[in-house]
Amino acid sequence: MLSLYKKVCFCPCKLLMFSCLLFSHADGSDSSAQVACDSTTELASNNTSADSVPTFHFKKKTSDEELNELSGKKFALNTDRKISWAVDLFSDWRKERMLDPECLTEILWCCLDDPSPNKAHLCHTLCSFVNEVRQKDGQEYPGKTLYDLILCLQFHLEKKGTFWKLIDDQEMVCLKFTLDNLMKERCAEHLGGTMSASPISFEQEELLWEMGILGEQQPNQLRNTVLFLLGISFALHSREEHRRLRSPGFDLQITK
């Protein structure tokens, strides 16, 4: 640079041109440095903002109250109303029995809101309940209503965390027999407005076979035949009894 300066210093025009080149080079270096500095600052600013305000696509942390609400068993609004009705009816019956000194000790054994109920005590209490419960006018409830009462009380226990099948539990078989006998009695009395169907005669059964409603050639025929034979053989009167039919109650054999 110094040697170049010595060569042009004796010529004013060359000296002026040389000075302009020096200034333009200096300005270009400063601009490049400024641009690089601005780019670095902007990148650092973007990184800092991205780190300080993270974005998530998941839902916020679930609270314990929300978890407890979600984990509990829920029912339809109409079912909840029936559950409340059954619980209130049981509570009223229990309060009335507590007024009797002879039943006081026995009835105190069982409470639906007990966190750890005794299965034997509950079975005994519910057997007495379905046998003694009455409508406000003193009339007996139909058998179907007694079944609904026990089912609603079971749902109430499930909401409290006690998952017992009151009707199908082997340790509460007395309740199942009591309810079954009461339902048969109420059905025989035609209580509830439902008349029992007349038995199918031999001629009617033969007509079902001849018309192809019963048979074994088609899937629909086989289904109808199984349903018909189960209803006749085990005296099943409703779809619920067909659903509750289980193999431990009988032996299956293949005959030729």
Image: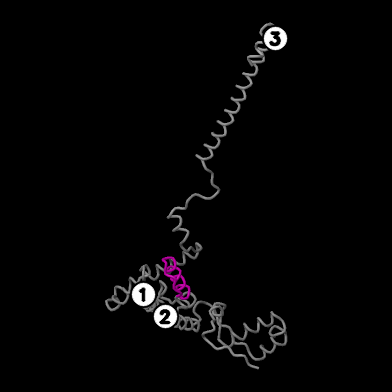
Mark number for residue 118?
1
Mark number for residue 171?
2
Three-letter amino acid code at disc 3? Lys
Secondary structure type for disc 2: helix
Colouring style = one colour
Is residue 244 magenta-colored?
Answer: no
Give left or right: position of 206 versus 196. right
Secondary structure type for disc 3: helix
Mark number for residue 14?
3
Q: How many angstroms separate mark 3 from mark 1 (CA)?
A: 114 Å
Prevailing secondary structure of the magenta residues: helix
Q: Outermost residue, left direction?
A: 101
> Which is nearer the N-term, disc 3 or disc 2?
3
Q: Which residues are magenta?
A: 146-165
> Which is nearer the N-term, disc 1 or disc 2?
1
Q: Residues within 10 Å of mark 1 (few under 14, many from 20)?
A: few
Task: Find residue 96 and report its horizontal and vertical position in percent.
Answer: 33, 72
Give left or right: position of 138 versus 251. left
Name the image quarter holding the C terminus: bottom right
